[in-house]
Amino acid sequence: MKSESLSQNRAPVYEALEEFRSARVVPFDVPGHKHGRGNPELCNFLGKQCVEIDVNSMKPLDNLCHPVSVIKEAEELAADAFGAANAFFMVGGTTSAVQSMVLSVTKRGDEIILPRNVHRSVINALVLNGAIPVYVNPDVEPNLGISLGMKLSDVERAIAEHPNAKAVLVNNPTYYGICSDLRSIVKLAHAHGMYCLADEAHGTHFYFGEDMPVSAMAAGADMAAVSMHKSGGSLTQSSLLLLGKGIDPGYVRQIINLTQTTSGSYLLMASLDISRRNLALRGRQVFAHVADLARYAREEINFVGGFYAFGEELVNGGSVFAFDTTKLSVHTLDVGLAGIEVYDLLRDEYDIQIEFGDIGNILAYISMGDRMPELERLISALSEIRRRFQRDKVGLLSQEYIEPKVMMSPQEAFYANKISLPLAETEGRICSEFVMCYPPGIPVLAPGEVITADIIKYIRYAKEKGCSMTGPQDEAIENLNVIA
């Protein structure tokens, strides 16, 4: 249980590491670089101050697998800051947090209701434990080609058809900033004795910003995976798993320890601790500034023309219940360029690295570290790209989401006897592996789904345009593994 005397000014892991640094302890434990002395090149690259606190678990610094002191206190502070009953530091990224959620509430043969446009980490968890996905296929915005949120009526139908499902999982928000009616979905799930889980990889700021879509904990969800390293400012691969009331934290800790490292990085934990303190003390003003930057960029990009930076005008009370105003998602097809082509042009011609480009859209991630001069540079570059590279959009694909036909559970298909076939010969076969563009990491194909002509066309098109395709055993994606 949380202490009544929590102070968000504290950062217990960080404070313990500073005390450790000043103690000048002689190390006869791992890691073997011994505060950087054994690897001068690494020390020069990362800096002595950083490498000195790359240390192993010990009594003064606590243990991530079974915290009893400074990590425990830091997790209590995180729970307090995020309005959760409990919080866990995760050092395997939000992938680890998402998988721990799913593994905590389902087991082999259990059904879980979820949108098909989930991150691959969700389906990976089903491969691990044998739970069965019940997909709610999202609507697709016809002009943008992107998948939207879960309509409440679709969730109601899924629950009616699968009354023994254990949980409903919701993206809050999607990569593009689309939010479902999370409060109503939570109430509906609970009314039918089901848990509600939220993948909040892109929603850390919902907990601290004003005029934002509702956060999972505020909506009453049972568990939420929160990517602190995305909009929260912590180091890459650091994340939080939040629990609502009624979830046994001891059991969840056991689930986490099934897959999470026993050698937790204190660099990552300290970054979570410091970043939580920063958000608790200054998050409101930080995210107000981020939202202002994104709003300004949308207006300027739309004034330039050709490109369409979409926003709250998409809200329809159903499949788009709310929109994350910090997201700068831009549709590119009206200038005759696929999103991935604009992504490549921005990097190669203008030295601007954005988050991702898919076949019809790009996402420029706006965060607490951005400033107006860089934003103006992005806007100017998009204007120049339109002027220099615009062409007829005939022949461009627009549909990002292809509704799957599921024939087997992900686990059954992944571990089944399989053969490798040339892509052209796989139509009608059941896939036994993943295929996706990364980012965003939403599978085009998942194990157990039928390979269709549209999917083959999409894969070829995405490869041709230069999307970063991942998942298959064959790195070139000339062949796919299918059920034998």
Image: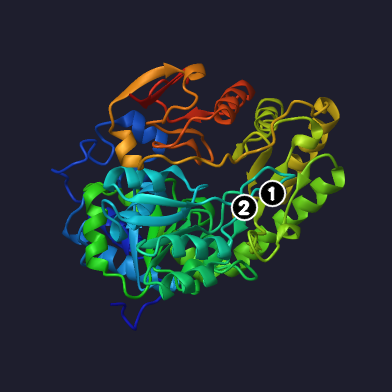
Say which residue appears at 80% left-offset and 36% top-offset.
Answer: 334
Front residue of 150 and 61: 150
Q: Residue furthest front?
A: 161
Residue indicated by mark 2: 148
Marks 1 and 2, how far apart in space? 7 Å
Q: Is residue 333 left or right of residue 80?
A: right
The answer to whether any part of residue 196 appears in the image is: yes
Q: Inspect the image, locate mark 2, and give the three-letter code of the amino acid beneath it.
A: Leu
Residue 416, relative to residue 463: is it above or below? Answer: below
Q: Tell me what residue is drawn at x 57 percent, y 27 percent.
A: 453
Residue 61 vs 435, above or below: the answer is below
Residue farthest toward the bottom in the current orientation of the protein: 4
Few, some or many residues within 10 Å of mark 1 (<14, 14–19, 20+): some
Residue at the spot 43% in from the left edge and 57% down from the top edge:
113
Tell me which numbered mark, 1 or 2, is placed earlier along the sequence.
Answer: 1
Q: How many marks?
A: 2
The quadrant holding residue 76 is: bottom left
Within 10 Å of disc 2 (Cα), the crowding (few <14, some 14-19, many 20+) is: many
Residue denoted by label 1 = 141
Q: Nearer the viewer, residue 110 or 258?
A: 110
**Of the pair 355 and 164, the residue shown nearer to us:** 164
